[in-house]
Amino acid sequence: MVSSMSSTKSYAAQAPYTPLAPFQIDRRDLRPRDVEIEILFCGVCHSDLHMARNEWGATIYPLVPGHEMVGRITKTGSEVTKFQNGDLAGVGCMVDSCRECSNCKRGLEQYCKVGNVQTYSGHDRVNGDITYGGYSTKIVVHEDFVLHISDKLDLAAVAPLLCAGITTYSPLRHWKIGKGHKVAVVGLGGLGHMAVKFAASFGAEVTMLSTSLSKEADARRLGAHKFALTRDPSHLEKLAGYFDFIIDTVSAKHDYNLYLRLLDTDGVLICVGAPPTPAEIAVFSLLGGRRSIAGSGIGGIPETQEMLDYCAEHTITSDIELIDMSYINNAYERMLKSDVRYRFVIDISTLS
Ligand code: NAP
Ligand code: ZN
Ligand code: ZN
């Protein structure tokens, strides 16, 4: 068979503290149920930065980050049924899983008991190759891990839904958060701004807990009903015992006990932010009020499609700053300063 494996432009990190730079990768030949996608836009998640700098200790270099991509189908394998050439398509944080464990069978591929295959820094289940993400001009993925994208919404602003969107939609749905609930969102970044939009859309009363006073007006515009500055103890005192749920999206080390105290009896602190350092929890913050602390990881493929369809129906997208590929290292520095309003999205045409 003549190999059609194609050389593809990308941006990669080669080591934890070197900037991302142009890099050539090979995308595999299409297997029968694979599709090839021309990537048009790719969101920049804080996880890309954690991974590029090996902050979680699991990075395989070279690393091509990017797990919030949208584009168009350019090729389909001989047994593909879900997509045709020209269709819009999206890929999120996973590109495969075992398909057989109890979680995969329930559509919870993110919790695959064998381990899902991450879009980047994972290993292909067939040949063991390293997976490379969306900071590149094209990708080849099994159709089961490709999402349908509506043409009703701004495509660049849809890209962040593939991670920031599903990661906040999934816990809100799991804990059935909506009308009658008081919810706080900690951290107004990529995940945080989607959490505010979804929680408000589901009918909850939403409070933004932020370190940045300059984001108050935006928080309210995005749907928050209240705003509290977490650096000001008097703001937090007033909210003691107030919330049913708190969604914590913070990317760096911080004090979880500060927020646990704000929960009502039986309240749940849901962690989606993933700081590299372990959390220190004072048990007394939990047992006074039977409070819990929980975590949630992205979302399964069926729920990701449900979220995308919900967004198309309710005209929900991300608030983005569109950037050229070459701006990526500046974008990372700004993300570290919490200076992103509220998701950087790479215009992949600037890479080709
Ligand atoms: P982001 O856009 O950088 O937003 C993080 C926000 O956290 C900042 O905007 C800032 O908000 C707040 N923050 C930052 N440093 C802080 C500190 N030291 N103390 C208190 N607040 C601080 O990041 P993101 O892309 O939303 O990702 C957030 C986290 O979620 C990352 O750790 C990422 O890896 C993780 N993540 C997890 C999943 C999952 O499956 N669970 C999926 C995707 C991402 P304010 O300015 O409002 O304070
Ligand atoms: Zn992400
Ligand atoms: Zn599985």
Image (tube, rainbow, N blue to C red):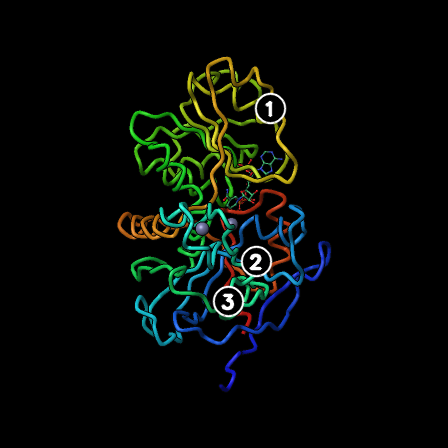
Residue type of the residue flagged with mark 3: Ile
Reply above or below: 104 against 14: above
**x, y percentage for residue 344?**
52, 54
Q: Mark 3, residues whose alpha carbon is within 10 Å: few (<14), some, or many (≥20)?
A: many
- The response on whether ligand 2 sits within 8 Å of label 3 is no
- The response on whether ligand 1 sits within 8 Å of label 1 is no
Is 266 left or right of 45, judged from the image as shown?
A: left
CA distance separating discs 3 and 2: 22 Å
Precedes in sequence: disc 3 or disc 1: 1
Q: Mark 1, residues whose alpha carbon is within 10 Å: few (<14), some, or many (≥20)?
A: some
Q: Nearer the viewer, mark 1 or mark 2?
A: 2
**Circles 1 and 2: CB atoms closer than 8 Å:** no
**x, y percentage for residue 340?**
54, 47
Residue type of the residue flagged with mark 1: Ile
Reply above or below: 44 against 12: above
Residue type of the residue flagged with mark 2: Gly
The residue where tag 1 is placed is: 281
Precedes in sequence: disc 3 or disc 2: 2
Tag 3, which secondary structure? Answer: helix
Q: Which label was assigned to residue 122? A: 2
Q: Which quadrant: the C terminus?
A: bottom right
**x, y percentage for residue 154?**
36, 58
